[in-house]
Image (cartoon, rainbow, N blue to C red):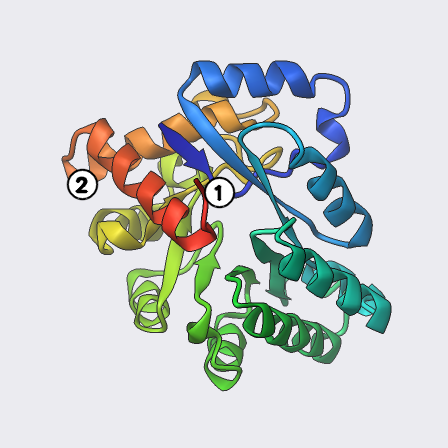
């Protein structure tokens, strides 16, 4: 069994054929899917999707939406964590590549949501794009290691991954590990401790090389795990078992 630890099934691309998408995932051995929110509406949709078998929700405000995060949203997010309807705060973080929210606003939103996670004792799902130094600083300053989490869709090098792991976080590997040009990421997937790896699709984005040009979906997380197994010269079953156990432990999945 595999767990897709980051799938945006709350994206409008899945509105028409979600049941078929879920069936294909099950047919490929994907036994559980974590659906993260990126604003209030998508977080609410993730919560509704978690009523289905083998789906869990995370709730949070993506850095692109940081300016929209208000006090009532923070109250609502905390309620979802405390009530157990959400397994994590996410997707949160910093994005200095697009800068769709002011950087200071992004940092404030990230810090506020990490504080919620610490109060509720739930992990965080972190987005980092062109903001590596500030992400690490905030994780340290907020003592985010007390709850842990994952840097999802990891895109940095092995040295950065080592520092992330030293903070008690996991590394989320997605479709780009299958791209021939992703040398740094392949080095990460090959060398970081197996007990710190998670697999994900980040669908509908970042489709693995074999199906590039198509919409990504949870069934394709098997291609991510197979690539990791090849890089590490391990059996696919060993990688599947390890990443599944890592996800169960981190998110409290049963």
The structure residue drawn at horizontal position 73% and vertical position 49%, both measured from the top left corner, is 43
Q: Is residue 154 visible?
A: no
Label annotation for residue 232:
2
The structure residue drawn at horizontal position 46% and vertical position 69%, both measured from the top left corner, is 147
Q: Residues under labels 2 and 1: Cα distance?
A: 20 Å
Element on which disc 2 rests: helix
Question: Considering the image in quadrants, where does the C terminus appear?
Answer: top left
Residue 216, image x, y percentages? 57, 28
Residue 133, image x, y percentages? 48, 77
> Which one is in front in this view, the residue at disc 2 or the one at disc 1?
1
Report whether 98 appears left or right of 127.
Answer: right
Residue 81, image x, y percentages? 64, 59
Label annotation for residue 5:
1
Picture quadrant of residue 42 = top right
What crowding class fits label 2: few (fewer than 14 Cα within 10 Å), some (14-19), or many (20 or more)? Answer: some
The structure residue drawn at horizontal position 70% and vertical position 79%, both measured from the top left corner, is 108
Report whether 85 appears left or right of 69.
Answer: left
Picture quadrant of residue 228 = top left
Q: How many marks?
A: 2
Report whether 87 appears left or right of 245.
Answer: right
Residue 58, image x, y percentages? 62, 50
Element on which disc 1 rests: loop
Q: Nearer the viewer, residue 26 or 212?
A: 26
72 to 44, vertically: above or below: below
Q: Are marks 2 and 1 in contact (CB under 8 Å)?
A: no
Q: Nearer the viewer, residue 35 or 75?
A: 75
């Amino acid at each position: 069994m595999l767990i897709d630890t980051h799938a945006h099934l709350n994206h409008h691309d899945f509105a028409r054929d979600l049941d078929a998408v879920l069936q294909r995932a099950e047919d490929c051995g994907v036994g559980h899917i974590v659906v993260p929110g990126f604003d209030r509406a998508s977080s609410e949709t993730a919560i509704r999707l978690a009523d289905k078998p083998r789906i869990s929700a995370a709730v949070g405000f993506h850095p692109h939406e940081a300016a929209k995060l208000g006090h009532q949203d923070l109250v609502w997010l905390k309620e979802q964590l405390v009530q157990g309807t959400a397994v994590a705060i996410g997707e949160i973080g910093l994005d200095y590549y697009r800068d769709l929210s002011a950087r200071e606003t992004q940092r404030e939103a990230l810090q506020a949501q990490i504080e919620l996670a610490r109060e509720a004792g739930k992990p965080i799902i972190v987005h980092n794009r062109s903001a590596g130094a500030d992400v690490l600083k905030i994780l340290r300053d907020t003592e985010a290691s007390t709850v842990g989490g994952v840097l999802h869709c990891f895109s940095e090098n092995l040295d950065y991954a080592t520092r992330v792991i030293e903070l008690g976080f996991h590394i989320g590997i997605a479709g780009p590990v299958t791209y021939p040009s992703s040398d740094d990421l392949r080095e990460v997937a090959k060398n970081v401790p197996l007990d710190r790896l998670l697999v994900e699709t980040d669908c509908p984005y970042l489709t693995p090389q074999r199906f590039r040009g198509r919409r990504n979906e949870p069934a394709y997380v098997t291609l991510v795990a197979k690539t990791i197994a090849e890089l590490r010269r391990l059996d696919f079953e060993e990688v599947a078992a390890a990443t599944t156990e890592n996800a169960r432990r981190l998110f409290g999945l049963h």
